[in-house]
Image (spheres, rainbow, N blue to C red):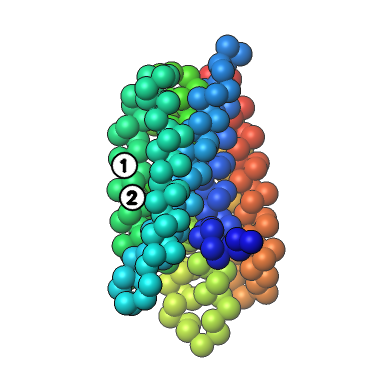
């Protein structure tokens, strides 16, 4: 019987949300009553297989560097990439969603680069996690394009909004984690300032986009939970941290984000 370790499934629970929430937003915003569910289902399968295959790729690269057996991870990598390719091929050959090709190339490049960072133990840095977010959130414009059949500014807008939102969690979670390190005051202070700076930038960017008419005011409600939790943590940096509870709340905030962003873009 295959175990989780044999399947090489990703261990980061937050990464699943960073993939599927943007996918759901893109699909819901681009969907119409005449849309067949088949293209989106094929994209869902292909996206999932490629995402899971990244873990097998990482283990294969690490095994090569450390001189360990590579066959188990290589076998799963070939299976996942093959399944992803077979699932995605009909989208090009039958449904003629040719713009998926550059999406796939960009996604592969970003996730491969993030894998290289992981081998070098640099994937947990702000830059490393942001690169992973750029790759994962491409699910939003990809799903929108498959659902609507068109590539326009809405697809790009969904990607930007998702990147801005999920990058917030990078700075926030690092702030919470580093607050546990009582002996590393400089690291805690650095995390506080970085988190404050990013969320000041995020708030300013959202207000400017809304003021210029580039963003519906309704989208601002999608960011209220994450902005509120960040302001609270910045004001109370010494509070107790339950990382499991933090993870659950981040998923809840992501659902709120999904609902409000979808309603906003559907109303346009």
Residue 149 location, quadrant: top left
Left or right: where 181 falls relative to 133 = right
Q: In x, y percent, where is residue 112?
A: 33, 54
In front of the other: 112 or 57:
57
> Which quarter of the figure is the N terminus placed in?
bottom right
Q: In x, y percent, where is residue 141?
A: 43, 32
In front of the other: 86 or 125:
86
In front of the other: 175 or 108:
108
Outermost residue toward the top in this view? 34
Residue 194 location, quadrant: bottom left
Give the spatial CA distance, label 1 vs label 2. 6 Å
Q: Label for residue 106? A: 1
Q: Label for residue 183? A: none
Element class at badge 1: helix
Which residue is located at x 53 percent, y 28 percent? 40
Regarding residue 109, the answer to whether it shows in the image is: yes
Whether residues under marks 1 and 2 lie with C-beta atoms below 8 angstroms apart, the answer is yes
The crowding category of the residue bearing disc 2, from other C-alpha atoms within 10 Å (few below 14, some 14 to 19, many at least 20), is some
Q: Label for residue 110? A: 2
Which residue is located at x 58 percent, y 78 percent? 180
- Is 136 above or below relative to 212? below
Regarding residue 227, the answer to whether it shows in the image is: no
In front of the other: 118 or 176:
118
Which residue is located at x 54 percent, y 81 percent? 181
């Amino acid at each position: 019987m295959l175990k989780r370790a044999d399947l090489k499934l990703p261990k980061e629970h937050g990464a699943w949300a960073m993939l599927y929430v943007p996918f759901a937003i893109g699909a819901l915003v681009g969907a119409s009553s005449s849309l067949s569910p088949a293209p989106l289902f094929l994209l869902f399968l292909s996206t999932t297989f490629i995402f899971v295959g990244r873990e097998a790729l990482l283990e294969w690269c690490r095994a090569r560097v450390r001189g360990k057996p590579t066959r188990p991870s290589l076998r799963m990598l070939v299976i996942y990439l093959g399944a992803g390719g077979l699932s995605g091929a009909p989208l090009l050959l039958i449904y003629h969603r040719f713009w998926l090709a550059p999406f796939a190339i960009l996604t592969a490049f970003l996730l491969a680069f993030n894998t290289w960072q992981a081998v070098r133990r640099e994937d947990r840095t702000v830059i490393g996690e942001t690169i992973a977010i750029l790759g994962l959130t491409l699910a939003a414009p990809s799903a929108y394009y498959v659902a609507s059949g068109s590539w326009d500014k809405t697809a790009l807008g969904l990607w930007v909004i998702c990147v801005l939102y999920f990058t917030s969690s990078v700075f926030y979670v690092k702030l919470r984690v580093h607050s546990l390190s009582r002996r590393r005051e400089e690291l805690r202070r650095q995390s506080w300032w970085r988190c404050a700076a990013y969320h000041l930038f995020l708030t300013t960017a959202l207000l400017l986009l809304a003021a210029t008419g580039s963003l519906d005011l309704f989208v601002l409600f999608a960011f209220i939970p994450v902005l509120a939790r960040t302001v609270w943590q910045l004001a109370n940096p010494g509070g107790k941290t339950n990382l499991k509870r933090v993870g659950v709340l981040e998923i809840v905030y992501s659902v709120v984000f999904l609902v409000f962003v979808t309603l906003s873009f559907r109303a346009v």
